[in-house]
């Protein structure tokens, strides 16, 4: 930037004290930066660039997906080592595959 080119002064927003926590919670849930969240809210436009972090719901679904994979592996290993009811074990593994498919669908991915 040359001396003649100067940046415009930033516009800041300071929510009222009573609304501060609600504002922060909404920004966090959106997965956007504060700037992108305000731009989207004020101008009713999509975020200026891709979100920096996954919204809370996506993080939760991704965590559940990882947990189902871990459970599936553990149940598969237990089934080999232990004398369990094979039908019950197969049903549990089938349920975990259905949960996995639902999590992937929620994340916009194909199972």
Image: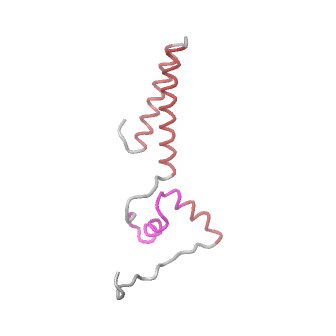
- Name of the residue lying farthest toward the top: 83
- Say if 2 sits above or below 109 in the image: below
What residue is drawn where x is 49% and y is 33%? 68
- Say if 74 sits above or below 104 in the image: above
Q: Is residue 28 magenta?
A: yes
- Name of the residue lying farthest toward the bottom: 4
- Name of the residue lying farthest toward the front: 2
What residue is drawn where x is 59% and y is 63%? 22
Secondary structure mostly seen in the magenta stretch: helix
Residue interval drawn in magenta: 26-46
What residue is drawn where x is 40% and y is 63%? 47
Indicate the colouring scheme: secondary structure
Numbered marks: total: 0
Which image quarter holds the C terminus?
top left
Q: Is residue 9 magenta?
A: no
- Say if 25 sits above or below 1 in the image: above
**Residue 11 locus on image (x, y percent):** 48, 78
**Residue 38 locus on image (x, y percent):** 47, 69
Q: Nearer the viewer, residue 63 or 100?
A: 63
- Say if 54 sits above or below 76 in the image: below
Which image quarter holds the N terminus?
bottom left
Left or right: 62 in relation to 14: left
**Residue 93 locus on image (x, y percent):** 47, 24
Which quadrant would residue 84 be assigned to in this image? Answer: top right
Q: Nearer the viewer, residue 79 or 41?
A: 79
What residue is drawn where x is 61% and y is 67%? 20
Which quadrant would residue 46 be assigned to in this image? Answer: bottom left
**Residue 89 locus on image (x, y percent):** 51, 18
């Amino acid at each position: 930037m040359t001396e003649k080119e100067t940046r415009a002064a930033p516009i800041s927003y300071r929510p009222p004290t009573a609304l501060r926590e609600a504002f922060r919670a909404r920004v966090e849930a959106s997965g956007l930066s504060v700037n992108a969240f305000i731009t989207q809210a004020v101008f009713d436009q999509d975020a200026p660039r891709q979100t920096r972090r996954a919204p809370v719901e996506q993080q939760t679904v991704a965590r559940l997906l990882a947990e189902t994979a871990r459970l599936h592996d553990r149940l598969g290993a237990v089934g080999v080592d232990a004398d369990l009811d094979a039908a019950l074990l197969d049903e549990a593994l089938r349920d975990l595959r259905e949960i996995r498919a639902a999590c992937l669908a929620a994340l916009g991915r194909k199972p």
